[in-house]
Amino acid sequence: MAMTTPSSHQDVQALRRGGLAIGFIPHLGLIQANGPDALTFLQNRTTNDVLSLQIGEGHVNTILNRSAHIQSAFTLHRQAESLWLLLDRTQIPHTLAELEKYHIMEQLTLSDVSDQVALIACQGSPALELLLSGCMEDPSLAETLQKIPGYGLTEGDLFGESVLIYQYNLTGESGFILQAGLDAADVLLIKLREAAQENGLSTLDITPDFLETTRIEAGIPKMGVDMNIETLLPETGLEQTAVSYTKGCYLGQETVARVKTYGAVQKALMGLKFQPNAQLPASEQEISLDGKTVGILKSITTSPTLECPIALAYLAKDCRTPDKSLTVEIGDTSYDVTVTLLPFYTPVTASDEARQLYDQGLQQFAQANGKEAEEAAVHTLRAAIEKDPLLADAYESLGVILSRQERYEEAIALMHRLLEVDPNRIMAHTNLSIYYMKLGDKERAEDEKAKATMLAFQQKMAEKGQTVDPEAERRKKEESTRNRIQLFKDALQYNPEDSLGNFGLGTAHLELEEYEDAIPAFEKTIVAQPTHSVAYLSLGKCLQALDRLEEAKAIYQKGIDVAATRRDLMPLQEMQQRLNTL
């Protein structure tokens, strides 16, 4: 449990206001992998695509057992001659044991070098500015630092000292980790602080309390605390960044793929916000709701940024609706909590940085003249998504590039994620139709094509064109909608329970504000397809318009639960907004 002291409380607030934190981070360590077989060995033993890493790139990665329980979590960084695993020191013995278990004839060495180097963190929005001021003797390093990707790695002379520099977010802010020799580390830290002062930057101390509080605010799960060797990878959310679905075999792959294909896990890591004056409960306690165990508490701290206690917790499906207020029992005490998506804190500039990376990726792709150049665009677009998981354009563009490389399964996964972000994205369905057809799945291809056609039809009818006669335009639109209603009614004569036909019929009546007629159609849609989150939203709109407010509240709440479980973000947000106004 992170207990925020007054000094660390002030430092966290200063960091969030643009401060700069510098200091040693002895809790992290390094495993170095060398040898001609290092890349292929780690490719076969880890969940992410190691072979795709170019020199100077890195990513989040994990090692699983056969049932997809996490044995180790780390970041992996590729240097010209070495691969570096950066992870918590306490996890190094078990990680080496898991790797050596399968090291038989391969030509590689795996070494714990944690005691041979020192690691210095430089965290906060001014971190890049500070490092650039130390590149006077190495201009090429300055150029590289300005383009370094997420989890990227570079080397050079910084303030006259030879270092490896990792792009690394420890606190929720942009930042770096510097790897230096033991004999140079103290001098380098002094030079960093002196340079910060010369540049008018006051520095904050990095303490264990400070790191733990900022880590929890940033929603970063910690191995040995928030997850262990009994935790399924899909329960943590790390599969979004630590798994390649196209790389080939690795231990635990079948379980990870099965969860991805067939739905959400029974419990998943979420955030909890407590009332500002609540006393911090102890971690590792069960969370109960109405006498039923619904979760377990993990990391907890008092957040200086949110000004209330916050916690990471594994929650059951029914309790994972964002912004949902619950009264739960933890130990012998009752708490009023609010469920949140992680992270609790995101830098204000994250979406702007994501958009810049997106534009950069498109430019790289436009100028690409080979597979290697296209891969640079792929890497940049992935970085944009990591910065802003709601940047729909990046998913679509990345999917198109991957499909050009015939990486259809990966492109399909991206399009499904895009539909979670923006359910009304016509091109997502169109692309899915194309990709499924390329894989020979004609049934799914036709289904996605039909969804694209329906969405395009609905959006076209909803557009407001310029006209000199608004009344004539209204009559024209109404006539067209009446024709649609008749078409749907004719189709439903053959299959009255068809969810697509009933949803189309209900939507047409809703457009004409014929709420009483729309309600049965939406109700049938939900009976036939209980996970149709947009149908709950539409039904709620009808009930709300008829002033049947209690019924509307109930439907919105059910819809929010469905949308949260499926991660249908657009209808989820609108239903939450409407529920808040009732």
Image (cartoon, rainbow, N blue to C red):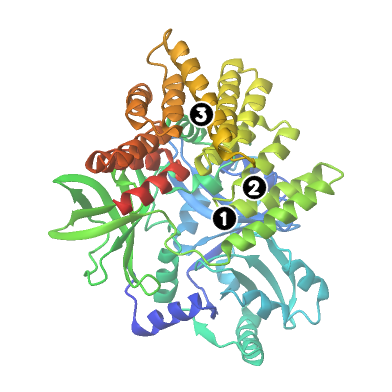
Q: Quadrant of residue 467?
A: top right
Position of 543 relative to 523 (above/below): below
Q: Which mark is residue 81?
A: none
User: Disc 2 marks which amino acid?
Assistant: Ala
Residue drawn at point x = 64 percent, y = 54 percent: 383
Q: For the point 31% across and 47% down, which residue is it?
A: 315
Vertical placement of 47 versus 361: above or below? Answer: above
Distance between the alpha carbons at the discs numbered 2 and 3: 37 Å
| Amino acid type for the residue under numbered disc 3 | Glu
The residue wearing badge 3 is 478
Quickly name the residue at label 1.
Answer: 388
Local secondary structure at mark 1: loop
**Residue 248 seen in the current view:** no
- First along the sequence among labels 1 and 2: 1
Q: Earlier in the sequence, mark 3 or mark 1?
A: 1
Rendered view: 138 above or below 551: below
User: Dividing the picture into quarters, in which one does residue 185 lie?
Assistant: bottom right
* Gap between marks 3 and 1 measured at Cα: 40 Å
Residue 311 rendering spot, x and y as whole percentages: 33, 61
**Secondary structure under badge 3?**
helix
Which label belongs to residue 394?
2
